[in-house]
Image: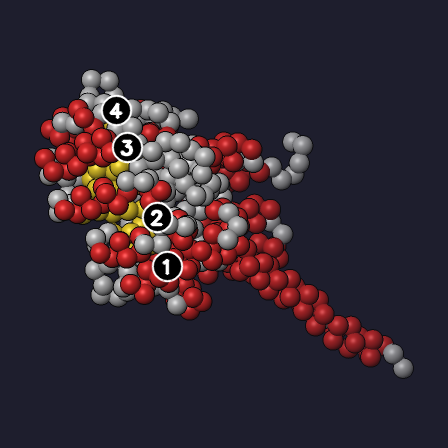
Amino acid sequence: MVPFARQLESLGYPDLRAVEVSTLQVNLGWRCNQACKHCHLQAGPERPEQMAIPTMQEVLRVAATCCIPVVDLTGGAPELNPHFEYLVAQLRGLGVHVRSRSNLTVLLEPGKEHLFEFFRQHRVELICSLPYYQEEMVDRVRGPGAFQKSLEALRRLNRLGFGQEGSDLELHLMYNPGGAFFPPMQKPLEDLFRRELAQRHGIRFHRLYTLLNMPIGRFQDYLQRSSNYDSYMGKLLASFNPATVPGLMCRSLISVAWDGRLFDCDFHQALNLPLLPGLPQTIGEFDPEILATRPIRLEEHCYGCTAGSGSSCGGRIVSGEP
Amino acid sequence: MSHYYEEKDLERFQEVGQNRPDLFDNFMNYYQGVMAAGALTVREKALIALAVAHTVQCPYCIDAYTRASLENGSNLEEMTEAVHVAAAIRGGAALVHGVQMRNVAAKISM
């Protein structure tokens, strides 16, 4: 395989650099009520990692002083952090746009059902995982019962106004493939989901984002067990699309781990690959000027963000295939 | 060669164009044009291709259009129905030739 760094060098990027830090993606912990087969963090109910209040206060300080417009909360299930509501309320008080990623089923866990109203009250943008519109596939990837619980959570969000046409209560869905294949083109899949979820279940949403499964964590284990790893990596390489490079999410985002360490993305965080030496390494050392133009750490799994239409936490990067 | 059909041979499809690249290029342009979105979506075309792949019993095509169907958002229920359509038409085509059999039998029978 051609090293990713050399691939970029041939395109005129001897050191890929950030262009801004407009999003702080904060991982509140690796604990999750689910243990999905594709999870790059290998999150699950037994994971102990949780962001503590002092680290959250550093996040708040950076959000307030560095003019970062968007804070993107992720996990694990971020809602399982006992200080989740504190952080969201404080961020909203600062006027920061809060985006929170939800697996949906966690909202039905005991003691969490108040979050539906909490999200509405604080105008939190929700990006909710739903890998398909049929039960069999969703439960196969996310565990028995996950689909029906997800539908129930979506119905409740819809009733509060989330996802409704013309509503500013944003509800988006996140699709990822249920196996060793690439995601569909985003727009046709969004049309398909919109039609099927409306007809079958009366559910509405705003946008659907597609995310390619990154060949790390549990998904890598699956690829290796099923003898799909080599062909998957070969397809990632063969599908490299130079047009995706300017829009790579690492160029505008910083990932903050549960313990306050800084990473170029959540995938690097999963593999414990911190920012390059010489750069600020923790949220306490956050320097917006240095980080906004920092050189980015390049690894082989970066091919997962540059294949086809590209892939990011905000869905595809470019509208067409190479 | 341990098998006539090797999975990796699909990746060597371009080699077929080596001696008459003009013909191969014409075919590929046509092929890509046919499979692009038109009155039918790419997803619908992949399902048709999957059904045809079963009627021509091409392992390369079955591999390619199983992946293509999944990568265009189809599910196993839809893909299985597509294979049944192929089977129904193949079976029906055999059966309707029973009329030929009956015609011949009638012609040569007293």
Circle 3 is placed at which residue position?
A52
Q: Quadrant of the N terminus of chain B?
A: top right
Q: Amino acid at mark 4?
A: Leu
Residue A33 locus on image (x, y percent): 43, 43
Crowd around label 3: few <14 · some 14–19 · many ≥20 (10 Å) = some
Real-space CA distance between mark 4 and mark 1, rounded to the nearest whole angstrom: 37 Å
In front: label 3 or label 1: 3
Position in image of residue A312 (x %, y %): 31, 42
Instruction: Kindly report which numbered mark, 4 or 1, lies closer to the viewer in this rendering.
Output: 1
Whichever of labels 3 and 1 marks the residue nearer the N terminus, that label is 3
Residue A280 against residue B14 in the figure, above or below: above
Q: Earlier in the sequence, mark 2 or mark 4?
A: 2
Q: Which residue is mark 1?
A: A154
SS assignment at label 2: strand
Question: A112 or B40: which is nearer to us?
Answer: A112
Q: Amino acid at mark 2?
A: Ser
Instruction: Determine the secondary structure under disc 4.
Output: loop
Residue A74 lies, with reference to residue A160, above or below; the image says above
Q: Which mark is residue A102?
A: 2
Query: Which residue is disc 4 drawn over?
Result: A275
> Which one is nearer the viewer's eye here, A249 or A236?
A249
Secondary structure under the numbered disc 1 in the rendered image: helix
At horizontal 42% and vertical 55% (from top left) the residue drawn is: A150
Q: Is residue A276 above or below residue A178?
A: above
Residue at 39 percent across and 68 percent down: it is A202
Q: Quadrant of residue A47?
A: top left
Front position in the image: A120 or A102? A120
Is residue B3 visible in the rendered image? The answer is yes
Residue type (three-letter) at the residue carrying disc 3: Ala
